[in-house]
Image (spheres, rainbow, N blue to C red):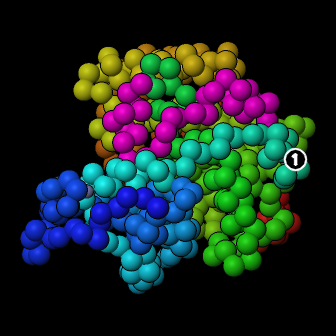
Amino acid sequence: MLPISVWNVILKNMEEAQHVYCDKHGQQDLKLLCSHLLAGSHEPIGFHEFEPENMAWCNECEKALSKTRTDEEQDQWSQDCGYKIICSVCWDTIKESNQIIKKAMNLEELEQKYNIQYPDIYKQLAANNMLDWGASGSSWYYDTFPKLKENPPLLLFGFDIEIWNDQELVETSIDEMSDEEDYRNIHPGYQFIPFAQNGAGDLYAFQFDLQKDGAVPVTLIPHDDEEAEVLAGNFQDFIFRQLLESVAEIDEGSIFYEEEEEDLKQNLFNQLKTHELYLTAKQVEILNTIYQRDIFEYTYKVPNGGSFETEGLVTFDEVEEILNREIASEYLNRSFNYTESPASNKL
Ligand SMILES: [Zn+2]
Ligand SMILES: [Zn+2]
């Protein structure tokens, strides 16, 4: 059992409590923990943080959270977790003993388990430690990210993407997709092996049912829409697409953003350097040329009729033109309803 003195915590201010009084640590900032983390365990049970509200919960609660869809379900979820107030020093102790060091990805194991063969480039990236974005968690941006900027791992400055390097995450995600109870109702005719996600929780996956001559297309699987979309015919083209799309719209929210354009460019060139090995010479040349431009403003006409002003190193129209020219393939940009069979989608 953990030496938790949380039960002795007294609320200093019942109205708008910002602080707690801990009998061990005195007055401290207030945080919240799920009942399981509070109860303690001999084994680590996971520690998932949510910064703005200073909450954390265990793996079981995380699993339950991933199944919630509506606001009511989320309210019920937070009740089930049984959140209790704890002092921030006690919180750190509990965090340390419950964080689970993720199991490094063993691609061979995954290949055997799912009877697949990952693309060579992906295996090469893994072998060169390019899938490793460092320890995840709420402090990632401040602690880990600055250290990665000089030698960016895979798609660090990509287009709304977080690369996975966690075998359990891959396995859990595949289990969920094939679960009959899963809300997405993905047709069993598809073989998706996810390797990344975006900020909204959509998955980037290898689509092995479309594999042909060793090339495995990469597909985006939305979490709230049944239309999946093939983004590239192979992994190399997917990397190229990401490095191109990420500079079409540049603002303070861009992950590679810096106050000075020169510094921002440095991030992009650093990334190009660590990614060269995995791209064709032509792709590197195109990116190099575009990254050397000055950021410019342009108006983008949306296909449905509207338009908006934005700025970047390349326009959306030019991106589309380059992709159609450089990474053309049988299924590029094909959308299909993943609840229906591949045959009915003519795949
Ligand atoms: Zn819990
Ligand atoms: Zn304390």
Picture coordinates of residue 247, whole percent (x, y): 44, 32
149 relative to 70, above or below: above
| Residue 327 seen from this side | no
| Residue 151 seen from this side | yes
Ligand 2 position by quadrant: bottom left
- Assess disc 1: are there few (<14), some (14-19) or many (≥20) residues with their C-alpha within 10 Å of its C-alpha: few
| Residue name at image x 10 percent, y 68 percent | 12
| Residue name at image x 51 percent, y 35 percent | 134
317 relative to 176, above or below: above
Going by the numbered disc 1, the residue's amino acid type is Gln
Picture coordinates of residue 294, whole percent (x, y): 35, 20
- Comparing 8 with 106, the one in front is 8
| 162 on left or right of 23 | right
* Res 264 quadrant in image: top left
Instruction: Tell me where the magenta segment starts and ends, as one range.
Output: 118-147
9 relative to 315, above or below: below
- Comparing 32 with 264, the one in front is 32
Picture coordinates of residue 121, whole percent (x, y): 74, 29
| Residue name at image x 68 percent, y 66 percent | 176
* Res 223 quadrant in image: bottom right
| Residue name at image x 62 percent, y 18 percent | 276
Q: Which residue is mark 1?
A: 112
| 310 on left or right of 328 | left
| 278 on left or right of 73 | right
Picture coordinates of residue 55, whole percent (x, y): 34, 62
- Looking at the rendered image, the quarter that the C terminus falls into is bottom right
